[in-house]
Amino acid sequence: MDAINLKNYFFYFASFVVIIAGMKMASQVVVILFLAIFISSIFSSVLNLLQRKHFPKIVSYFLLLLIVIALGFMFAYVINISLKDFLGNLPSYEVKLRNLVLNTIHFAQGYGLEIDKAKIMETLNFGSFFGVTTNIIGSISAFLSKFLLVIIGVAFILAESKSFQTKLRVIFRNNAKKLEHFNLFSFNIQKYFVVKTFTSFLTGFIVTIMLTF
């Protein structure tokens, strides 16, 4: 019995390693898929609301898809403009940050503190830091270029949302309690996504107001 249990543990561990390795190799596809699921989870509630208001299914579906596309292009436009401004001002940011550190060191030295300025500047390595920032921005730009794939994923998931419920009822036709638990889990996930989206939007709005004024 112990040998069988040990064999099962090795099997589960090997399966886990294979799954993680597969997700690592297909990381770009996995990110796009999860983003499509995230967006669909938010807008599926809106789709259900439109259908409860007696909108035709095809009309509500295409209306919601147009809203998603419009919001996506608006988001991509804002990100593109912000990245261009940031990259254009990047050299001046580096100079200002370097001067701020130097002024802080001089201020501390004025009070008799012994500080190795060369060592601190070498440790901070501003050029490397801003190089990493540029690479991150490049990754974001590359991801935004795959926006069409995200939209296609959202379209398919929203189109299957109603039939998915029907399939679940067929699968759990002999166990209504499991279906109820699954629906509750799905509802809580949607509610979490909505709350998280609202709080993130509110945080961004407050930061924008603070930076503006």
Image (cartoon, grey):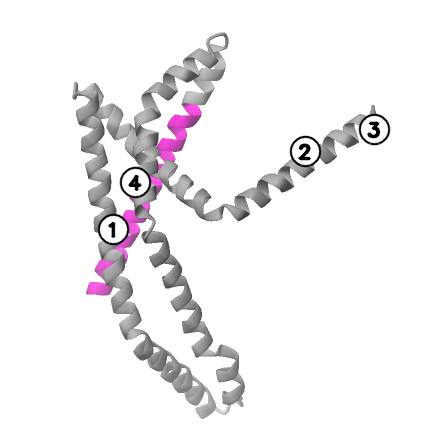
> Looking at the figure, which quarter contains the C terminus?
bottom left
Nearest to N terminus: mark 1 or mark 3:
3
Q: CA distance from mark 4 to mark 3?
A: 49 Å
Residue 140 horizontal/vertical position (percent) = 36, 57
Say whether marks 1 and 2 touch (CB < 8 Å).
no
Residue at position x 32%, y 53% in the image: 145
Q: What's the amino acid at mark 3?
A: Ala
Say whether marks 4 and 3 touch (CB < 8 Å).
no
Q: What's the amino acid at mark 2?
A: Tyr
Q: Callout 4: helix, strand or loop?
A: helix
Q: CA distance from mark 1 to mark 2?
A: 42 Å
- Magenta segment range? 184-213
Q: Does the magenta segment cover residue 132?
A: no
Nearest to N terminus: mark 1 or mark 2:
2
Q: Up-down: is 29 above or below 93?
A: above
Q: What's the amino acid at mark 1?
A: Phe
Please give the residue where the numbered disc 1 appears in the rendered image: 75
Residue 32 horizontal/vertical position (percent) = 40, 44
Q: What's the amino acid at mark 4?
A: Ile
Is 201 placed left or right of 33 in the picture? left
Nearest to N terminus: mark 4 or mark 3:
3
Residue 105 horizontal/vertical position (percent) = 45, 86
